[in-house]
Image (cartoon, grey):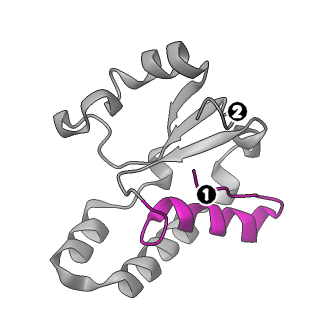
Amino acid sequence: MKDAGIRRLLDVRLNNASRLAGFARRADLPFFLKELCGADYLHEPRLAPTREILDAYRQGGGWPGYERAFLDLLRERRVEEALDRNLFEVPTVLLCSEATADHCHRRLVLEYLDHEWGDIRAVHL
């Protein structure tokens, strides 16, 4: 993240306090981000899936159903109106629990915001 010039980490996880997250817990992450790469930390739960959407996916609902449900949720929440677009005025990275963007809601968030706002450039680190 430091090499990529990231100045802000936007945490889009539903559960950002789990002990399983190690140093990526809400209590530790702001300190490490500031110390290691000078980045700020923000948690944005409006960009997280609901427990019901996650549970349906984990119980075998499949990615297409998850994607539809999550995009419907973003539309219902009207995140393009609720969020301050200035969140992305500095290089910003989204954090979730998936290692790659293939089956990850952070990719869906960025594609949705790019569709609504335009001019969102996503680089998967």
- The residue carrying pointer 1 sits among few (fewer than 14), some (14 to 19) or many (20 or more) residues within 10 Å by Cα, namely some
Q: Is residue 1 left or right of residue 22?
A: right
Identify which amino acid the numbered label 1 is placed on. Val
Q: Is residue 4 above or below residue 83?
A: above
Q: At x 67% / y 38%, what residue is drawn?
A: 4
Extreme residue in the front direction: 3
**Residue designated by label 1:** 79
Mark 2 residue type: Gly
State the residue position of label 2: 5
Give the x, y percent position of residue 30.
46, 21
The stretch of residues the image draws in magenta is 100-125
**Residue 58 screen position, x and y as percent:** 20, 72
Which circle's residue, 1 or 2, is located before the other in the chain? 2
Query: What secondary structure is found at the residue carrying circle 1?
Result: helix
Real-space Cα distance between discs 1 and 2? 26 Å
Q: Is residue 107 magenta?
A: yes
Residue name at image x 51 percent, y 59 percent: 106
Q: Badges 1 and 2: C-beta atoms under 8 Å apart? A: no
Q: Residue at x 36, y 81 (%)?
A: 63
Q: Residue 31 at what x, y percent from top left? A: 44, 15
Picture quarter with the N terminus:
top right
Identified at 75% across, 35% down, the residue is 90
In the image shown, does 123 or 76 lie closer to the viewer?
123
**Circle count:** 2
Could you say whether the residue bearing mark 2 is in a helix, strand or loop? loop
Residue 50: % across, % down: 33, 61
